[in-house]
Image (cartoon, grey):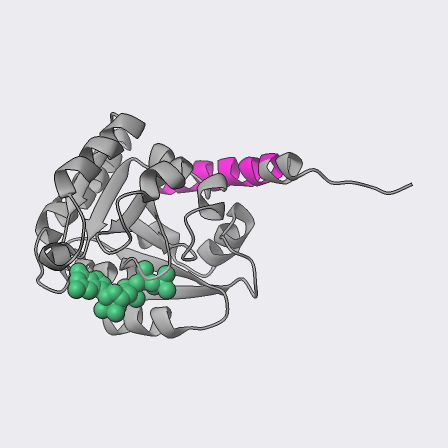
Amino acid sequence: MVNVIYSNKIIKANGDIAAENKRFLEEKGVVLLNLVSAPGAGKTTLLEKTLPLLVDKFKVAVIEGDIYTTQDAERIAQAGAEVVQINTEGACHLDAVMIREAIKQLTVEELDLIIVENIGNLVCPAEFDLGGDVKVVVGSVTEGMDKPTKYPLAFKEAAIAVITKTDLLPYVEFNLGAYIDTLFKLNPNIKIFPVSSTKEEGIEEWCQLIGRLIWKKRRSMNVL
Ligand SMILES: Nc1nc2c(ncn2[C@@H]2O[C@H](COP(=O)(O)OP(=O)(O)OP(=O)(O)O)[C@@H](O)[C@H]2O)c(=O)[nH]1
Ligand SMILES: [Mg+2]
């Protein structure tokens, strides 16, 4: 007799812990952003440009997901935010249990925002809720036009899409308008932010959206 654990049970168990994380973060009035992308799409670089614009106004912490290293966490610490590293030691996504443990390392009562940089992978992270998280899919113009249709779940689940590396548009086969059309076809409500982190274009608009999410949360908590 062989015991089989089906993956949909694991995903359901993850959902239960995610619901606990959600309740906890709701109570504390904290917004959780979950950044998902293929490896190298520009998540850490985006955060390096984003954090300096946020840390003056809001209390922000970052949870860095990586398989083995602390390289991204060190970059985030340099950018001036509190950071907790999760090393999955092989797993290709973060899950709600990992986030519950990481949150214990933070003084959540004092925070407005937690940004999670998930493991670079467009497949598995899309399947695992972390807990009340606003999902942000990051796609770069160097990845090609076909990623949203080839890996649709990440793009369908996301509330926000950040299109990175727009400074490289003149050098790559990438039609920004057609890509945006594809995103809207998959997810009519998605909010889209084209950015160049290296040229610091579009970063302010993206930060304004994050600010609006925090103010909305504060209003729902009746703290305004
Ligand atoms: N030209 C250009 N390069 C960028 C931009 N953003 C990131 N890069 C480059 O893309 C590469 C990967 O950037 P990262 O920010 O490390 O990507 P990531 O998504 O965090 O990567 P993983 O954590 O490994 O998944 C680096 O060489 C960055 O300098 C951009 O806006 N323009
Ligand atoms: Mg990174």
Does residue 16 show up magenta in the picture?
Answer: yes
Residue at left 44%, top 66%?
Answer: 85
Secondary structure character of the magenta stretch overall? helix
Of the pair 35 and 22, the residue shown nearer to us: 35
State which region is magenta: 12-29
The x, y position of residue 3, in whole percent, is 83, 41
175 in relation to 191, above or below: below
Q: Quadrant of residue 180?
A: top left
Q: How many marks?
A: 0
Which quadrant is the N terminus positioned in? Answer: top right
Would residue 27 be seen by someone viewing this image from the given angle?
no
218 lies left or right of 63: left
Query: Which residue appears at 21% of the width and 48% of the height?
Result: 163
Left or right position of 97 against 77 = right
| Ligand 2, image quadrant it occupies | bottom left
Residue depicted at 32% across the width and 65% down the height: 82
Q: Residue at x 51, y 38 (%)?
A: 20
